Image: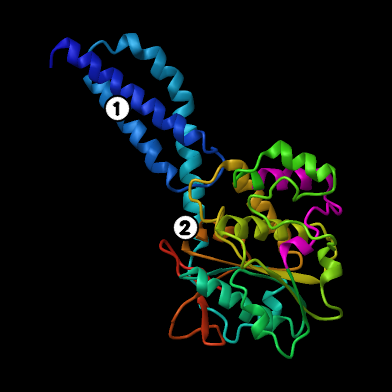
Amino acid sequence: MNENLRRISFSILILVATLSILAETSRGILIPDPKRVYGISLAGLLMYLALIIGKNRRSFFPIFFVLSFFFPPILMLTLIPFRIKRRSEAYRAPAKGMDLLSASYGSNLVICKSVRIMSSLATSLAIEISKRRRVILVDWSGEASKRFRDIEHRIASPSDIWLGYKGILGSSYDLTLSELLSYFGVDQSAILNVIRKRDIRSSVDDILLPLSEEHVRIDEALPKPGGALIIDLSKLNARGKNAISLMVLLQCLAYDDRDFLVISPLLSPITDERLHGKVRDEIKWIISSLSKSGCFILSTHEASQFSDEFDTVLECDSCATPIYRLNGFRLCPWIGGKGKRLF
């Protein structure tokens, strides 16, 4: 290999390796992500090849001396969470006769094969649990009202419910809501401004329905002493459904001592595998906070990246020994691609 070709190859390998490391670290070093280990390992291999190709290695010693302080810690931070997650997915036999009422006091992820199943199963869960507890059901399909017959319920559109109520969360709620909605392309500063004016929806008309003249807080809209509040999102597009679902989940966190749970389908952002670190941390905070009084979040397989954050992970499937049967649906222990989870 002639000298010019050697230098060009060396420079290209170093450049690609550096860009690979920067790309992986920009996603957030401390956030567990098993896929990051491949990018970091590739960068290390490219650097090794560059050392072999490089003829005058001494002149590049300062560069590799500096990189040696960063590369091993980054590699360790990608490997450690990866191994912990695999251990946490060890299989244990599920208990027979799952108690949905007990599960409703924790955070539950139900993995479904399609949006249609998500919406239908959410309604079935709400019907079953609302016999014993007050439930907020986020209805994506608009069919829930037809299935609630002998159970007390109320139907509301997103424009009827006050979703800008800050409650006890104060400024932290403002920040969380603005960061999450900015994921859907809504300007963050505009969201903060409308929250301060006590009207969260005035600047996000592209994804929400227009406000009605009167709107109430979620706790006021819920039937008492029991029953379900159905928030009908059937007229919204996909982005609007996801945004409102997130806002309802956030709204429920504004009540420290709430006696109701929320059941909602949700895709983006929890199904986005390249999720920004800030939004990922906010989602983890939401899931942890919802464990206080309970939630059922129904999503697709991609949401399993957040499986460790939930108290329970289930799968709507056709397993031979389901934990629970619900209107033709079978709730089974989730079997992940790299391990197994238990109810």
Magenta segment: does it hold 169?
Answer: yes
Q: Nearer the viewer, residue 114 or 313?
A: 114
- Which portion, as a residue range, is magenta? 157-180
User: In the image, residue 182 lies at what x, y percent?
Assistant: 64, 43
211 displayed left or right of 239? right
Q: Residue at x 81, y 59 (%)?
A: 162
Most distant residue in the left direction = 1
119 displayed left or right of 253? left
Q: For mark 1, does the 10 Å Cα neighbourhood hold few (<14), some (14 to 19), or many (20 or more) residues?
A: some
Image vertical order of residue 3 relative to residue 281, above or below: above
> Mark 1 or 2 closer to N-term?
1
268 displayed left or right of 4? right
User: In the image, residue 223 lies at what x, y percent?
Assistant: 83, 77
Q: For mark 2, does the 10 Å Cα neighbourhood hold few (<14), some (14 to 19), or many (20 or more) residues?
A: few
* Quarter of the image where the N terminus is located: top left
Q: Nearer the viewer, residue 83 or 6?
A: 6
The circle drawn on residue 86 is 2
User: In the image, residue 299 lies at what x, y percent?
Assistant: 54, 65
Q: CA distance from mark 1 to mark 2?
A: 29 Å
